[in-house]
Amino acid sequence: MTLVESPKPSSVRRRRLVTEAVRAGIATDPVHGAVVPPTVLSSNFTFKRFGEKRRFDYARSGNPTRALLEETLARLEGGAGGVCVASGMAAATLVTQWLGPNRRVVAQHDIYGGCHRLFVTLKARGVLDVDFVDFTDELAWRRAIADGCALVWLETPSNPLLRVVDIAQIAETAHAAGAKVVVDNTFLSPANQQPIALGADLVVHSTTKSINGHSDVVGGAVIAADAEDAEALDWWCNCLGLSQSPADCAQITRGLRTLHARWRLHEENARAVAQLLEEHPAVARVHYPGLPSSPYHALATRQQSGYGAIVSCELVCTPALPGEDAVAALCEELQLFSLAESLGGVESLIAHPATMTHLSMTPEARAEAGIGESLVRLSVGIEATDDLLADLRRALDAVAERARPRARAAFAG
Ligand SMILES: *Cc1c(COP(=O)(O)O)cnc(C)c1O
């Protein structure tokens, strides 16, 4: 495996991907000429004649509406095939079942909380041998892979600290050691990052997030670089019954049509938000690879074709307003960032990882991953930029005001 020279799609290929996302299945209905492909809800399909089945027989194993989404996602990610499942966690489950028992997994230590919980639980049950490693520490990950493993699980940029790791370099090392590489590409979507071009074997998505983009479906997908892996994943998906319903697939396909257009606006807003946060006195530290001050800026610029919609920051803590209180104050003040889990939808959200998305991690694991009490994660939506900035500025000013040392008047007498 050689290092890929240009991980980013050429402008011609990128243009083609945008068009493919918009036009997936358009005007292919042979019966009515429907512009948008009809959603096929049928759970079963007739045989052509005795002993001769059609492409589909039973909807758990496959159906036209899911197949369209799977084929489109596989094309956008540059894979040989894909499987759409009921959630992002179903996608992670599918990969662990496909992998088989008693295999060693080396996983990034700051992955999505639910994936972390899955791995910890499977390890505690003796199903998988999992080691969590800081992949920003080159010595540590090289040693962990050299110890022997079947699978390397990456998530870059990571959640919620937006750490970026070098997919091509890690994939080359993992392949030399006989391991397969999975990248959870939920944070950037294929619009901003193509892990398979960088050497990944599998790409995992929570399509709940940016791919659907409208916060109204839960879904997941696994895309494989290799046709044999894609087929095996499809077999396991059917065997385990993890497949996604046609109605949900139709809705996700609709969301996917606007992915690239939405993503341009998300990014424009996220950059502006990151800049504002970096300049505001109520903010101690900003995590966004798009900022030139980020330690991951150079790698992200090389590896990604954009910086995404997620910005995290740590608030300034004072004795008058310690970490969690500062976060609570900010959430109360904000009007255009709703306090909710999830990310990548058109609406702006704010989350507090320590008490929300990453609550299932032990306090020790959170501390090790660098997820402190004053950390907040913003999923920046596509509202008008100036509205978002005004809302943030006003709320942060209010937090700064409350963080000031209390008046000494009380002690005066
Ligand atoms: C949300 C998320 C998941 C899990 O997906 P669900 O659809 O909620 O099951 C996995 N990885 C990342 C990075 C996520 O953000």
Image: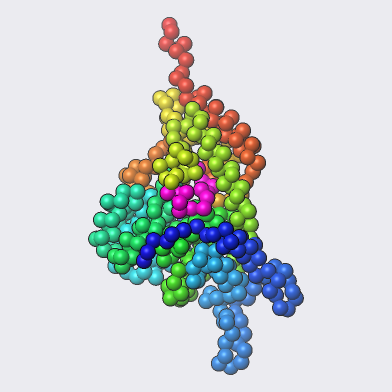
Residue at 41 percent of width and 63 percent of height: 199
Residue at 60 percent of width and 35 percent of height: 389
User: Looking at this rendering, what residue extends furthest in the bottom direction?
Assistant: 50
Query: x and y percent of residue 89 in the render?
Result: 46, 60
Left/right of residue 44 with respect to residue 196 in the rendered view = right
Query: x and y percent of residue 197 in the render?
Result: 46, 62
Left/right of residue 368 with respect to residue 262 in the rendered view = left
> Compared with residue 363, is residue 280 higher up or lower down, i.e. above or below?
above
User: Looking at this rendering, what residue extends furthest in the right direction?
Assistant: 32
- The reply to whether residue 93 is in sight is no
Comparing 255 with 306, the one in front is 306
Magenta stretch in the rendered image:
299-311
> Compared with residue 135, is residue 76 higher up or lower down, i.e. above or below?
below
> Compared with residue 325, is residue 156 higher up or lower down, i.e. above or below?
below
Residue at 37 percent of width and 64 percent of height: 2
Q: Quadrant of the N terminus?
A: bottom left
Query: x and y percent of residue 132 in the render?
Result: 32, 54
| Quadrant in the picture for residue 191 | bottom right
